[in-house]
Image (cartoon, coloured by chain):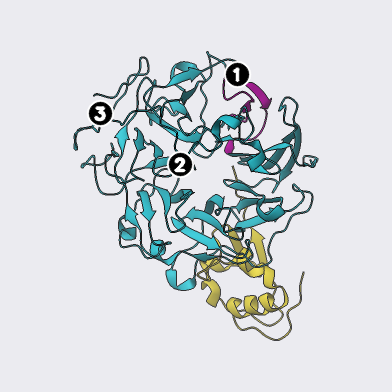
Chain colours: A cyan, B yellow
Amino acid sequence: MPKVKHVSAKNGDVIVLVGTMKGAFVLRSNKSRKKWEVGGPYSIGSPVYAMAFDQRQGRRRLWWAQQSFQWGTVLCSSDDYGKTVTEPETYSVKFPEESKLTLKNIWQITPGRNDEPDTLYCGVEPAALFESHDAGKTWSPVEGLLNHPHRPKWQPGGGGLCLHTIVPDATNPKRMMIAISTAGAYRTDDGGATWQARNNGVRAEFMPDKHPEFGQCVHKVVQHRERPNRLFLQNHWGLYRSDDAGNSWNDIANGVPSDFGFCMATHPHDPETVYIVPIESDQYRCTPEGKLRVYRTTNAGESWEPLTRGLPQKNANETILRDALATDTCDPAGVYFGTRSGKVYGSSDDGKSWRVIIEGLPAVVCVKAAWVGDDRKNLPRRHKGTENKRAKSRPVKSRAAGKSRPAKRKAAGSVRAAR
Amino acid sequence: MLAIAGSPATVAEALTALWKEYPGLRDRIVDEQGTVRQHINIFVGDEAIRFADGLSTKVPADAEVLIVPAVSGG
């Protein structure tokens, strides 16, 4: 058994949580983010698909989902970065018997809004949303989604029918967007009582009808708190932006080697900036052309630039999964991603340059990052009070409904949205 | 090795007695629907209950009930 090491973080430090197929790790650095200490592995031998850090109301609580072939999936927590672990005697996240469902895995753990400091959410497999309003002591399924009329028609993807993305709206407490593979994106505007499919414009290449109401394999949806009506979406083929809270989506695959990918993350301070890691195709789920490239837009998707300094540009056939890309809230922002080959890369300068933080891990499936301490002090001056700042980006023209790209993509060259 | 007081007639009754003493075991051995988890094997003596009557498998007096996690992984 590996020897378990522990880290301890103080205010001002940066932590990166890494969930792998054989346990969870906690990386810790100071704000320079040059040297990293490694804590773990925790939940040794267990796939850890989801991790989260809750530092609302002075907490310093790690959450992670420990999955076991034998013993099922249980939500664990620690208030000292893993040194002591709370694994509940009775599992806290589980389906009611009358649902006829059984929990296979927890795919996402999301702390609620700052003004709801005791609220947390879990996205699970089979697709459902669980919520807690007592800081994680007790959990219950969100009935409006559990009993959704579309449920009987939701189909699993290769990884299972999973609710993997939870986006509580930054300003509207009644609104939330979630994403399910392969049911698509859904939004509630009434606190979870009802949910509507929000996939207008998002294609499903694997369906006879390429633009169904639901059934897309949405891989990730992100929102920046300063632009709550704007969302970005990485699809199983397709890169999109919505400027109306998800009512409609427009193609923004401008200058990327592939519009297939899994992960996506926003810059913590710039609502125009988003990061992705394009993947060649659904047939060959590795980075295109053997090059490991993060792509960044700084104009909300009008164009994308490759970020490659410090990343291998040959013989790099890497896979970065949907929850394995994250940013911290420092300035300049730290950006981190983990690969299925067990490497974690980090940038401490908004993605301009990268280095390997740690390698030799089991396959990485989840990466989260946090600047420990008061987030508000870290807001760069240029972004304070910028709610009324004019967006640098222009509205995106929508593609005609029903028009979709060819299913196959060439590996070389770029994909450009038709105007 | 745990000795269960009483004379449970079936594996289901034996497990119920086990949960009373060790409630934390329940969620780890059966799922929300009360079904034994896929990678857990339960034996009455040498007989695997999945090839017998499942949770209704009879438990003779002084029988040994074994709960064995399968060798699963990857």
Report the disc number at residue A353. Answer: 1
Q: Is residue A78 above or below residue A327?
A: below
The region drawn magenta spans A341-366
Which of the two discs, 2 and 3, labels the residue nearer the N terminus?
Answer: 2
Q: Do labels 1 and 2 share a chain?
A: yes
Q: Which amino acid does label 3 sit on?
A: Arg
Determine if residue A338 is in view: no
Instruction: Identify residue for label 2.
Output: A223
Which circle marks residue A55 in the picture?
A: none
Subunit that carries the residue with mark 3: A
Would you say residue A250 is visible in this rendering?
Answer: yes
Residue A237's place in the image compared with A189, above or below, is: above
- The residue indicated by pointer 3 is A405
The mark nearer the N terminus, 1 or 2, is 2
Density class for disc 1 (Cα within 10 Å; few <14, some 14-19, many ≥20) is some
Task: Specify whether A314 is left or right of A55.
Answer: left
- Residue A8: percent from left, percent from top: 79, 42
In this rendering, position of residue B3 left or right of residue A394: right
Task: Give the spatial CA distance, label 1 vs label 2.
Answer: 24 Å
Quarter holding the C terminus of chain B is top right
Q: Is residue A86 magenta?
A: no
Residue at 61 percent of width and 61 percent of height: A118
* Proximity of marks 2 and 3: CB atoms separated by less than 8 Å: no
Residue A239, given in percent of the width and then of the height, sits at 36, 32
Ranked by sequence position, the earlier of labels 3 and 1 is 1
Q: Are marks 2 and 3 on the same chain?
A: yes
Could you tell whether A102 is left or right of A310 in the image? left
Q: Say which amino acid is labelled 2.
A: Gln
